[in-house]
Amino acid sequence: MRTSNPGERPAETRILVPESLDPSDPAIVLAAEFIRQGELVAFPTETVYGLGGDATSPEAVELIYAAKNRPSDNPIIVHVGAPGDIELVAYVRDPRVFALLDRFWPGPLSVVLPAKPCVRGAACRGLDTVAVRMPAHPIALALIRAAGLPIAAPSANLSGRPSPTTAAHVLEDLAGRIPVILDGGACRVGIESTVLDLAGETPQILRPGEVRPEEISEVLGVRVILARGEALARSPGTRYRHYSPRASVVLLGEQVSVNARMSLILQLAANALPGVKIGLLAQEAVPGMVSVPKVLSRTYSGVAGLSRCYYACLRELDAAAVDVVFVEGVADAEPVMERVRRSSSMQVLTDAEARSDQVLRDILSLLSN
Ligand code: TXA
Ligand code: MG
């Protein structure tokens, strides 16, 4: 196998599996060397895989945008290896920030604060704020510490594709585009970190994640809400269509009964062209569906189960050349439902809608596009 060394353009993408979590592990040492040389390394975090480069180097950050085809004005989260290292890249003026870090770091919380000059021209794309997080995955922490640098890392997918939760997903999108992937198995959370904006007048959540608004409110002593409208537009990432598989996603709201759902899918299977394949992602296998050859069902258990498997299921159903994926809505699962809404082409919210001819026609027309 031809592989590249730090400093050379990647010929092939090398997958390295660390044998220990020691910073002296050969895989970690080599990956850290790539980062120090200004090259990119994909690595596991507890949320999703990240595509990392030196957060203070405009050239390394440029490579990240090129590898992902990422819109050039969307800033990147900076990953640090210890809570105190936040001050390498951000100004922390409010002591409550440290209380937050005490409670949630390492973990899936990114905080947006005024940026220090060393990252403004690189990871921040000229913004005067920076999003920072200390990931909880031991391989991520070992890599950051061995590199001795803050690491800028967006999700390691091609822009617009579902975020990767295994090394195989990263390879699917970025083979030949990056030199190294550190393989740490499947990610525990499965969706990206909560992004909390602490740079404005009032703290606001720009992206929901596993760390919930109520938990943050408790520590800060003020009610923290999800940003909407103009405030949300401050997070550049929200301007782009995200998380899209090749298949069209149809969200079936929590109000849609199992019967209405079944009748919609059976009607669709009966009316669609012969080659059409339908995917279904639901908590429980729907009786009667198994026998419909056009329908591929995937099940999971609980909210955490849906978050963990959502992106992976979209990729799997894409690989099976499914044309439309129905996703069952789940209560009390805002973070993952936000991703479902953002990847969906259509939302069917009531029983009556699910049983209407118009909805059936709309879905058939999605299929013919
Ligand atoms: O869980 C995660 O956060 C993963 C892992 C790899 O850490 N990373 C991730 O990065 O999801 P990315 O680039 O795919 O999403 C970062 C989000 C984007 O929506 C971006 O616009 C927003 O954070 N963001 C980054 N810097 C920001 C800033 N200074 N102000 C506001 N939003 C910012
Ligand atoms: Mg992303």
Image: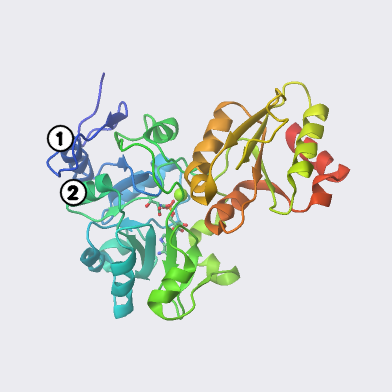
* Alpha carbon separation for disc pair 1 and 2: 13 Å
Can residue 173 be spotted in the picture?
Answer: yes
Task: Return the x and y of residue 151 as percentages of the image width and height.
Answer: 28, 52
Q: Which mark is residue 147?
A: 2
Q: Is residue 74 above or below residue 29?
A: below
Can residue 128 be spotted in the picture?
Answer: no
Crowding near pointer 1: few (<14 within 10 Å), some, many (20+)? some
> For the image shown, how many numbered marks are present on the structure?
2
Q: Earlier in the sequence, mark 1 or mark 2?
A: 1
Confirm if mark 1 falls within 8 A of ligand 1.
no
Task: Pick the residue in front: 258 or 149.
Answer: 258
The secondary element bearing badge 2 is classed as helix
In the image, which is nearer the foreground, mark 1 or mark 2?
1
Task: In the displayed orientation, state which residue is furthest to the top.
Answer: 1
Task: Pick the residue in front: 56 or 81.
Answer: 81
Residue at the spot x=39%, y=77% of the render? 220
Q: Quadrant of residue 149?
A: bottom left
Crowding near pointer 2: few (<14 within 10 Å), some, many (20+)? many
Which residue is label 1 attached to? 26
Task: Return the x and y of residue 364 as percentages of the image width and height.
Answer: 79, 35
Q: Which mark is residue 356?
A: none
Quarter holding the C terminus?
A: top right
